[in-house]
Image: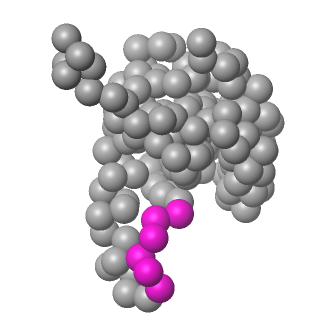
Amino acid sequence: MNPDLSWVLNDVLQVRGARHAILVSADGLLLERSSDIERDEAETNAAAMSSMQSLSRAVAPFVGSGRGLWKQTLIEYDGGWIFLIAAGSGAYLAVSAALDVDMEAMSFRMQQQVGALGKAMTTPPRQNAGADA
């Protein structure tokens, strides 16, 4: 049984300018969505967010310092922002926000929520079901 993680999304959406929030598994499946986004749209965006984090991890060494570990992706569009962070092993939290969002408050709130969740947001790797069939 999957735990109800909607409280995480509701809290993140308290930041002024926040629009939608989704929890995504590493393989692009929607784990949870905020109530203001339709399921189909949330599922499409979940797959895209999984790809975004994968690309972000792949280009992390381009930063040129440190170990090149991905921590957060922030993308600006003409209508707003997307924030994407790791939310445990194999899970990600993505939030869309208006252009005038308080970016520091949003990043802080997302980090706070992810820290509070710990194991609740960790998605174990999938087992190969075909081997048992």
Q: Establish if 24 lies above or below 72.
A: above
Residue 40 sits in quarter: top left
Left or right of 111? Residue 133 is left
Residue located at (37% from left, 60% from top): 56
* Residue 65 location, quadrant: bottom left
**Position of residue 39 in the picture relative to residue 54 (left or right):** right
Quadrant location of residue 93? top right
Q: Which quadrant is the N terminus positioned in?
A: top right
Q: Residue at x 26, y 27 (%)?
A: 128
Which percent across, then down, holds residue 88?
Answer: 58, 46
Please state which of residues 19 and 33 is positioned toward the viewer in this rendering: 33
Where in the figure is residue 63, as x and y percent of width and height? Answer: 39, 81
Its colouring scheme is: one colour
Query: Main structural element of the magenta stretch: helix, strand or loop?
Result: loop
Please say whether residue 70 is one of the residues in the magenta stretch: yes
Q: Position of residue 83 (x, y in %)?
A: 55, 50
* Front residue of this view, candidates 67 and 99: 67
Tell me which residue sits at (68%, 25%) in the image. Answer: 5
As for residue 22 lying within the magenta part, the answer is: no
Q: Residue furthest front?
A: 132
The answer to whether residue 45 is visible is no
Tell me if residue 130 can be seen: yes
Span shown in magenta: 66-71
